[in-house]
Amino acid sequence: MKILQGTKNKWKLSLIIFSLISCGKPQERIYQAGLFSEKTDLSTPAKSTGQIFKRLTLTSKKEELIGGILGRKGHMSWNIINYKDTAIHFNPNIRNVIEDYQADEIPVFDFSAIYYLNPQKTVFLADIPGPSRISGRTFVFYARPDGLKVYRIERPSKEQGSSGDENDHRGITKIGGNLLLVDNDYLFNQRTGKAYLIKRPDPEERMQADFTSLSPDGKTVVFNAKGSVFDHFDYIYQFHYPSGKFETDSIPADQYQSPLQDKQKKWPETHYSWIKDNNGRMFLKPKPAFTVK
């Protein structure tokens, strides 16, 4: 209930912000979000000597209950992003993806966190919360020489449906010094702005795995996943993003769980070593004392 009420408050704020910013001004542009893919070119930034994007925090003067019946009284606040001194509001365009999503009628404003994708700070990622049972989405905002472009990161998944997809969105995770992991579907390099599509073990399902470690050269990302109660196996997924090579190792669950207690921090390096293949790519391989059956 607390989460639901808090989410509704966010979308109520979107309407308030829209009214505040639009009042007394000419109708501002509502950007339409297109669909992002790994082929989307982010390498031609707008040329500017000044700050293209500016983040501002607005706070309501009115004190109200925040977080539902278990919340507290306070002043609600939200973050907006200005593009060349004009607040960005956009249409996420996902009604055709999730039937219950009615937000295409509500311009979106609230930016909880942003991550720049190049040193010039002309491209950034933002995680935008969704209303009610609908999970959030990640969007790309790209200042091109011909203007601002907005893209929605969305890959089809059989978990999604008209009843909502609260558990389907994993958001943005920073791994290593310059890499951003988005929904277990994309890796973004913050130095170059380049995006890498992560192969799915099941093409119709988002990889249900947790980030585990990064290779010493920073080019191979490792995930681990619990298997189902039926197959009695756990899995290690490895993705060498510069080449796109993806490897899967299955391990009997009892072997995976013993003798290691803290798998998240120490597995799989305790039983594996980083080995380079003939092309110089690093992958974890079982140590002689630990052979995958």
Image (cartoon, grey):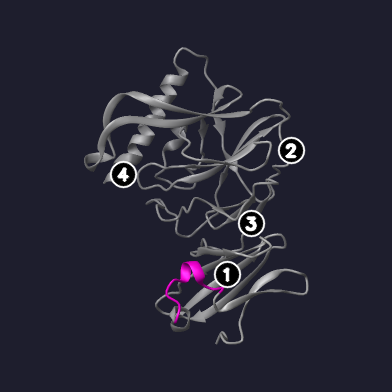
Residue corresponding to mark 1: 237
Tell me residue 276's x, y (percent). Answer: 72, 73
Kindly state the secondary structure of the residue where label 2 is placed: loop
Q: Which residues are magenta?
A: 259-269
User: Residue at the top extreme?
Assistant: 24
- Can see residue 231? no
User: How much space separates mark 3 and mark 2, taking CA atoms?
Assistant: 20 Å
User: How much space separates mark 1 and mark 4, taking CA atoms?
Assistant: 34 Å
What amino acid does circle 2 point to? Thr
User: Badge 4: how crowded within 10 Å, few (<14), some, or many (20+)?
Assistant: some
N-terminal of the two: label 3 or label 2? 2
Tell me residue 114's x, y (percent). Answer: 54, 40
User: Badge 1: how crowded within 10 Å, few (<14), some, or many (20+)?
Assistant: many
Residue at point 50% right, 58% down?
157
What amino acid does circle 4 point to? Leu
Find residue 273 and report its image quarter. Answer: bottom right
Residue corresponding to mark 4: 4
User: How much space separates mark 1 and mark 2, taking CA atoms?
Assistant: 33 Å
What amino acid does circle 1 point to? Tyr
Tell me if residue 274 is in the magenta stretch.
no
Residue corresponding to mark 2: 44
Find residue 11 and report its image quarter. Answer: top left
Residue at point 44% right, 24% down?
18
Q: Disc 3 vs disc 2: Cβ atoms closer than 8 Å?
A: no
N-terminal of the two: label 4 or label 2? 4
User: How much space separates mark 3 and mark 4, taking CA atoms?
Assistant: 32 Å
